[in-house]
């Protein structure tokens, strides 16, 4: 199932299209001497592709999940952090994904 077909199945396709996300009906990739052109394959009667802004798509999906009864927990903004010059590790109140980052400075 294509992403556009999944959005239609979930009742969200029209909302994504209304978010200033035009449907993509034809592709063209120009590699200089070679150009590839084509159209998205039809999946469950939907034959378009989409390229919505990630922030717009995320909000549509989260809002839909919330309306469907999901408990939505959005992380708070974390800005306090400390660095150690000895090993260049980031520590403190930072998202877990940053706790293993190392500085190259």
Image: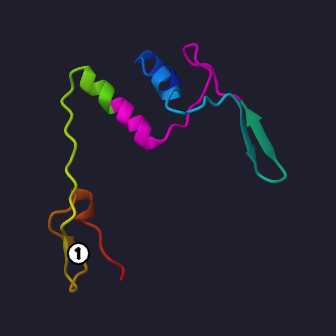
Residue in the image at 80% along x and 44% along y: 35
Disc 1 secondary structure class = loop
Q: Is the magenta stretch mostly helix, strand or loop?
A: loop
* View extreme (top): residue: 45
Q: Name the residue under label 1.
A: 89
Q: Where is residue 24 in the image (x, y as percent from the top left)?
A: 64, 31
Relative height, residue 27 to residue 84 (above, below): above
Q: Report if residue 40 lies within the magenta region.
A: yes
Colouring convention used in this rendered image of the protein:
rainbow
- Given residues 90 and 68, the one toward you in this image is 68
Residue in the image at 26% along x and 58% along y: 97
Relative height, residue 83 to residue 12 (above, below): below
Residue in the image at 19% along x and 70% along y: 81
Crowdedness near tag 1: few (<14), some (14–19) or many (≥20) residues, C-alpha within 10 Å: some
- Given residues 1 and 62, the one toward you in this image is 62
User: What span is colored magenta in the figure?
Assistant: 39-61
- Given residues 44 and 77, the one toward you in this image is 77
Residue in the image at 14% along x and 68% along y: 92
* View extreme (bottom): residue: 86
Q: Position of residue 37 (x, y in %)?
A: 76, 36
């Amino acid at each position: 199932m294509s992403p556009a077909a999944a959005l239609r199945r979930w009742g969200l396709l029209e909302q994504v299209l209304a978010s200033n996300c035009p449907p993509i009906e034809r592709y063209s990739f120009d590699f200089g001497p070679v150009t590839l052109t084509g159209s998205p394959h039809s999946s469950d009667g939907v034959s378009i592709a989409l390229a919505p802004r990630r922030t717009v798509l995320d909000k549509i999906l989260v809002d839909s999940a919330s309306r469907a009864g999901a408990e939505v927990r959005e992380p708070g903004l974390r800005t306090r952090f400390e660095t150690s010059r000895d090993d260049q590790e980031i520590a403190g109140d930072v998202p877990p994904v940053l706790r293993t980052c190392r500085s190259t400075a």
